Amino acid sequence: MTTLRDPLHAQLAGKKLTHGKLPRFTPIGLLVLSVAIVSGLLALFDVFSVPLAVVLGVVLFAVAIMALSGAVEGSRSARDRLATTVMYSAFGLAVVPLVSLLWTVLRYGLDRFNGYFLTYTMRGVFGGMDAGGVYHAIVGTLEITLFATVISVPIGLLTAIYLVEYGPTRLGRGITFFVDVMTGIPSIVAGLFAYALFALFLGPGVRMGVVGSVALAVLMIPVVVRASEEMLKLVPNELREAAYALGVPKWLTIVKVVLRTSVAGLVTGVMLAIARVIGETAPLLITVGVIDSANFNLFDGRMMTLPVFVFRQYSQGLAPNGITTINYDRAWAAALTLIIIVMLLNLIARLISRLFAPKTGR
Amino acid sequence: MTTLGQKVTEPAAPPPPARQRVPQRPGDVIFSGAARAAGVLILVILAAVAAFLVVEAWPAIDTPTADLAERIQWIEDGQSLLGYVGPLVFGTVLAALIALLIATPVAVGVALFISHYAPRRLAQVFGYIIDLLAAIPSVVYGLWGALWLMPKLYPFFVWLSDTFPFIPLFDGPVASPPRTILTAGIVLAVMILPIITAVSREVFLQTPGLHEEAALALGATRWEMVRLAVFPFARSGIISATMLGLGRALGETMAVAMVLSPGLAYSIFILQAGQQQNIAANIALKFPESTSIGVNVLIFTGLVLFVITLVVNMIARWIVSRRAEFSGAN
């Protein structure tokens, strides 16, 4: 502050008005250099490993770029460079588990992932036998998830319609709040609820596919509501007004105009919701149980599902004879099957929304 | 619920008779009734979740302490119901806190990266990549954590224990394989990262553009702009995102069940196995083999978990909704 009072030219005498600027390629060059130096040092001491080299390399890079930038560009710029480095590393760090997980599942899962695995059940398979598949689990997963969808889509969609089309009411605000809260219900609690509901009427120890469907529906409804709400809000008001001007009743306007316009988005939302619940394990483990052969009847007896299959194979551990790692192999292959289903659902959902999206102002 | 519903219907009732009555078509009445019924049904379901859990947990609450230990194998003599739930709550909170400590800084960094640092064109793709993390089923995370990650973490844990022997948290001996709560916390951190990132990203993107431009125009560097314009605006959003992540971490089942070697102690030794357990994983592991009163006890623990997550989520959502009203005025 005091310097401001000095005459300007005296203050600026001998000072540059601009800072230097590092060339654009500096960060990348410096990063490569740091990682190379660290790798070299680690190799010298015989403790080389890729993750260690990358981590220490990035640390060295951060220090180096701060020093360099501090010298050339000033301390504020140096801090900015450091922040940029931290942001990029955070993203890199977040991608590591994703890549490693997908790669691990592919590497261990591809061995057993074949037509036989997909079309045979675990009936009569024991120990380290080189046999067994997930047919029964796929059947169970598809049926249970489908029924959960049948329950939750009408409820979720109608609620979204109420929230968007019938205006902001106090009830509507309450519903919005509790739908949001409901997205946070732990999946195991949803499972306990479904079990308690059926146990009250059918007696304790009940294990049926439909119980699992109810549990999944509890988890799915809020997701469907939120997704549909977003989509319905995107429908331009002019379309509704045009329909009203033509004397179309409100409910027909909703069915024929609003829903027709947003159908692609709604399908996307529902598919993403399915993708979210299809991998749920805990509620199915406690409501549907486990079984080794295919059961097509949702309303009678235990069923197997893919996520529970993964868990069961994993928890059986190493086999005493034959192929000792067979259980883990099956778990990986089933995990691969599950991931493929989830990714396909995600991909198709995004494609539908991309291809059929109505053109809006956004 | 019904009082709410009635209040809402009043304004919809026909206006004073001076005007001609708007014709009520049966289709409209049925459709709007169905829509409202669906909305009310959701509230009923949420209430039913609580009610059924209470009904099924009641026998456990009602049974005297001595009976509990006698009838259930895994409850020790003289251990009361609350004495059984206590360590589980402790384990649940501990695992969630570890996950939160690891995930929050990374998630906020990633969200900032996507909203303010990444090249514009790639930002959306990066967003999808992070969302993919959320799409992977929890059981696959468990498998990955138990079979792939655990051996990789062991040397790191040993180093941690050797380097910081004065911190009681890291007291050895380090379990091998490290089926410890720290491993579970790390896996949980990966799982809650996407939700924290998604919510923070939304909030960061809502920062008024004029604030950012003003900061930049005054000569702020990008980091200074973030500190001056983005963080003050997004603070409450980050807090609520963190709490949503906390809610997820509290209720996560399979990853913990597959990674953690369970124990029932109030133990802060995060590198030792068989010390803690989380409520959800405990239910998943014990439920299939339990009968009658054992099931009731497990449902009681589920009720406790439900209440905890409900409170956390309600606070988080309340912060978000309060914020939403403010952001419009800003």
Image: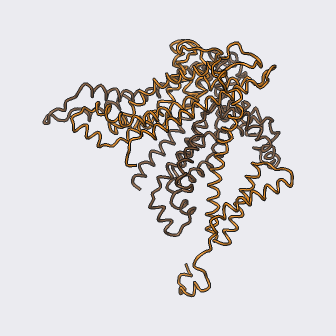
Chain colours: A orange, B brown
In the rendered image, residue B144, in percent from the top left (x then y), is placed at: 69, 35
Res B175 quadrant in image: top right
Query: Is residue B142 placed above or below B62 in the rendered structure?
Result: below
Which residue lies most toward the front here?
A115
Q: Residue at x 73, y 40 (%)?
A: B268
Q: Nearer the viewer, residue B294 or A97?
A: A97
Q: Nearer the viewer, residue B236 or B135?
A: B135
Res A38 quadrant in image: bottom right
Q: Is residue B295 left or right of residue A352?
A: right
In the rendered image, residue B264, in percent from the top left (x then y), is placed at: 72, 30
The tally of labels here is 0
The answer to whether any part of residue B87 appears in the image is no
Query: Is residue B40 placed above or below A32 in the rendered structure?
Result: above
Which residue lies most toward the right here?
A45
Q: Nearer the viewer, residue B95 or A319?
A: A319
Rendered-image quadrant of the N terminus of chain A: bottom right
Q: Is residue A295 left or right of residue B321?
A: right
In the rendered image, residue A137, in percent from the top left (x then y), is placed at: 61, 21
The answer to whether any part of residue B111 appears in the image is yes
In the rendered image, residue B269, in percent from the top left (x then y), is placed at: 75, 39
